[in-house]
Amino acid sequence: MRFAAAFMGLVATITAGCAQAQSGKGDSAPGEVAGFDIAVFEVPAGSHPHDAAPGPEGQIWYTGQRNGTLGIIDIATGDVREVPLGEGSAPHGVIKGPDGMAYITDSGQNAIVRYDPASGKIDVWKLPEDSGYTNLNTAAFDGDGVLWFTGQNGIYGRVDPADGIVTVFKDPEGRGPYGITGTPNGEVWYSSLAGSHLGRINRADGSVTMIDPPDAGAGLRRVWADSKGDLWASGWNSGKLYRYHPDTGQWDQWKLPGEGAKNYAIYVDERDRVWMSDFTSNNTLVFDPARETFRAIPGSGPDAAVRQILGRDDEIYLPESGLDRVMLVRMEE
């Protein structure tokens, strides 16, 4: 399915002056990647969009990490507005909750922030004072509607939106908790970049069971569950894509195309295709598990730095933090 002609006209306007996208294997003009429909939205200069997520229907949310905002893109018109999140804000991750609100990990405020798109109300739930600076990263909901989050300085935690009470736990191996995902059965796993392990959280008492990947020091940056409950993880140090089967304890692994790959983001879409970003080639890669093949989407300019990937239905959102842009992708088939 292709975007409407008016929408593609918006793409041409937005991408004017972006003559070519760097792919590492030759150049390609934005919006002209075979097999994909692509739109690129400029966001305010200096916002450094770190994560992007589905907002209300027809909108994309992103975190303006360097200007302390939640960005809101209207897909149909291309209009962009930003909502200030508070003094000292430096938001990292954003996801849409079961209640339709935006939940944000704000490392600058050392808090979980909730934004209500209906009223514009902002709630700020500070971490306990004795937590120190946690370098908050990413969040995910469990099957009971409780929000779990990670902090790179060695913590993970939870907050129940019903009461706003925040509880923090320490990773047994210290620094590193980064990506986090809920699974189809309502459980929560996180990945540790510095600790290079997966962690399965016991939601009852907050304890964690750690699982090591096949490669020591792989640098598991992000993790995402597919429809079967298998876990896909990005190996930042190893340049690999990993799949872990919790039922059997087995691992599968694939080396990313090219030399010196740096696998950052990870997301599994509704068809169980795996999306990831390679900082070395400046590509977003799409992996088909059935065929075990990769397809590449170049960034809209050099050093796009896609740090997280989320989506809705057939739409995939790529925040290009290095370019102050957000890319919207649809696969043609």
Image (spheres, rainbow, N blue to C red):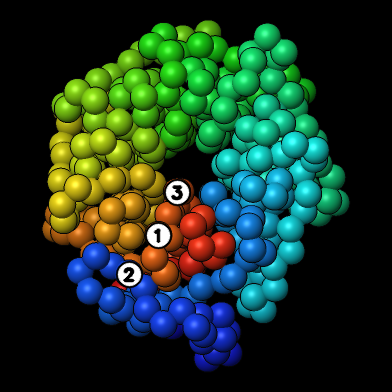
CB under 8 Å between callouts 1 and 2? yes
The dot on residue 42 is none
Of the two numbered discs 1 and 2 on the same chain, state the one appearing first in sequence.
Answer: 2
Judging by the rendered image, the residue that carries numbered circle 2 is 22
Give the residue displayed 53% in from the left and 8% down from the top: 205
Judging by the rendered image, the residue that carries numbered circle 1 is 303
Circle 2: is it few (<14), some (14-19), or many (20+) Cα within 10 Å? many
Q: Position of residue 309 (x, y in %)?
A: 44, 52
In this rendered view, identify the residue nearer to me: 224 or 323. Answer: 323
Q: Which one is in front in this view, the residue at disc 3 or the one at disc 1?
A: 1
Q: Position of residue 128 (x, y in %)?
A: 70, 14
In this rendered view, identify the residue nearer to me: 265 or 203. Answer: 265
Q: Which one is in front in this view, the residue at disc 3 or the one at disc 2?
A: 2
Secondary structure found at label 3: loop
Marks 1/2: CA distance?
Answer: 8 Å
Secondary structure found at label 1: loop
Q: From what the image shows, is residue 254 above or below residue 44?
A: above
Could you tell me the amino acid type at mark 2? Gln
CB under 8 Å between callouts 3 and 1? no
In this rendered view, identify the residue nearer to me: 282 or 140. Answer: 282
Give the residue displayed 15% in from the left and 52% down from the top: 259
Secondary structure found at label 2: strand
Give the residue displayed 64% in from the left and 75% down from the top: 78
Circle 1: is it few (<14), some (14-19), or many (20+) Cα within 10 Å? some
